[in-house]
Image: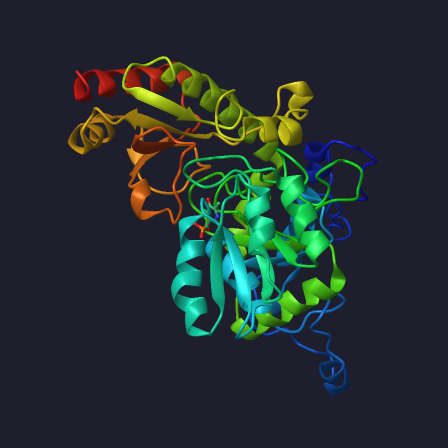
Amino acid sequence: MTQAPAADLSTRLIHHDYTPPAGFEAPQPPVHKASTVIFPNVSALRAREWKDKSSYTYGLHGTPTTYQLEERLATLEGGLQCLLVPSGLAAIATVSLALLRQGDEVLIPDNAYGPNKALAEVELRHYGIAHRIYDPLDPADLAAKITDATKLVWLEAPGSVTLEFPDLPEQVRICRARGVTSVLDNTWGAGLAFAPFDLMGDGQLGADISVHALTKYPSGGGDVLMGSITTRDEALHLRIKLTHMRLGLGVGANDVEAVLRSLPSMALRYHAHDLAARELARWMGTQAPIAQVLHPALPGSPGHDHWQALCGGAQGGQGAAAGLFSVVIDARHSQEQVDAFCDGLRLFKIGYSWGGPMSLVVPYDLASMRARATPQLKPGTVVRFSIGLEAVQDLRQDLAQAMERAFA
Ligand SMILES: *Cc1c(COP(=O)(O)O)cnc(C)c1O
C-alpha cells in the first residue's frame, strides 16, 4: 500500500507505507521474530550492511517489524531516522553514552526527568563526564552554563512533575548558536503537541535529537516498556546507532507489535486525556486545600505563555497538552494529611508512569529533587496526577471524597 497524500498526522500514521505479501492485502504488519537471519552465501554474509536498513544481519539489530515501528515513529516526530530501545530511560542513557566522552560536560534542566539526573550524577561521573544543572525558565542561565566542554544539552518541555514550560525555541537557538547538540525528551509532547524538529513551523528550527518514552502514550496500555531515539541528521544518527549496536540494545517483537497496534489511536487518546486533565486541573484550582495548580495550558501556570506560543495552535486552536497535572497542597496541611489524601483515593492508583487507561497519583518531596530554589512554586507538597480514560465526573468525585476526608 502506498502512502496516502494526506497531511494530518493521525491519517498518515494509519496509512503508513507497508507492502503486504502478494495476495494478502491486510493493512496490519506481521510480527517477525528472529535472532539468526540466514544469508544465501558467504559473500552475502561478508557484504552485510549494519549501518542502514538496506539489509538484515541479526535480529538484535533489526527485523521488518522493528523497522516498521521505527519508520512510523520517525513520521510521528518529523524525523528521518529512529532507533528503538527497551525503555525511555534506555533512550536517555544511549544518547548520553553515545555523545559524551571523558572530560565533556552535559547540561540538564533542574526539572528534568529524575533518572536522567541520577544517570549523570552517578554513572556519567564514573566515566569522567561532568554535568551542570540549569534553570529551565531562564535561557540566560542556559547560555551562561555552556562552556567549551559542553557537548550535549538536555531539554524537556515541560519539566517532569512540576510541568514548567520553557522557552524551547529560544533554548534550541542558544544551543545552535553555540554549536552544542541538543536533545529533547519529547515524552510529554509525544509528537502531537508540537513538532520537535520544526518548532516554528518554517522547517528551520528544531532539536537535534528527540527521545520518547513509548511506554507512555504510544503504548497507551500501561503494559509495554520501550523508548525511541529520533534524529534528522544522518551522521548524528550513525554515531548513536553504533553505540546502540555495541551496547546490545534490542526490543521484543511482541512489544513492538503492541505499540504498532496502539499508534493509530494515539492522537485520539492524547486528546481525550488532555480534555479530562484540563477539566480536572481547573476544578482542583477552585478547591480550598490547593495552593497552586501546575498545568502548562492553564493561565498562571509557570511557562504558560511558552506553552501557548508552541502548542496553542494545535487541535484547531484549543492547544494540545498531555493528560498530566500537579497540584501544590497548601503548606498548612501536614505530610500525613497529604499521604491520607493519596491513600484515600479509590479510582486513582498510587504508582509511577502515565499514558495508560488508569488514573495515577504520586506525592513528591520536591526539596530532595531540586538543585536550585523554585520561586515559581508556592510552598506546600507537590502531588502529580496522571489522568487516564475513566469518566471525568467519577474522577472528580473521587478527588472530592478524598480531599473531604483528608483535609477536613
Ligand atoms: C517515563 C519517562 C521516561 C522513562 O521512560 P521508561 O520507559 O519508564 O524508562 C523518560 N522521560 C520522561 C519525561 C518520562 O515521563
Residue 143 appears in the rendering: yes
Q: Position of residue 100 (x, y in %)?
A: 56, 68
Q: Position of residue 220 (x, y in %)?
A: 49, 38
The residue lying at 71 percent from left, 82 percent from top is 45
Q: Position of residue 307 (x, y in %)?
A: 59, 30
Q: Which of 280 and 153 is in front in this view?
A: 153
Q: Which of 369 and 43 is in front in this view?
A: 369
Quadrant of residue 260 in the image? top right
Q: Nearer the viewer, residue 197 or 395?
A: 197
The residue lying at 72 percent from left, 33 percent from top is 11
The residue lying at 37 percent from left, 18 percent from top is 284
Left-right relation of 278 to 151: left
Residue 250 appears in the rendering: no
Quadrant of residue 10 in the image? top right
- In the image as oriented, which residue stretches furthest toward the bottom? 42
The answer to whether 203 is drawn above or below residue 289 in the figure is below
Quadrant where the image shows the N terminus: top right
The answer to whether 122 is drawn above or below residue 379 in the figure is below
The residue lying at 41 percent from left, 73 percent from top is 126
Q: Where is residue 211 in the image (x, y as percent from the top left)?
A: 58, 51
- Snapshot colouring: rainbow
The answer to whether 144 is drawn above or below residue 322 in the figure is below
- In the image as oriented, which residue stretches furthest toward the right? 5
Left-right relation of 382 to 279: left
How many numbered discs, if any?
A: 0
Quadrant where the image shows the C terminus: top left
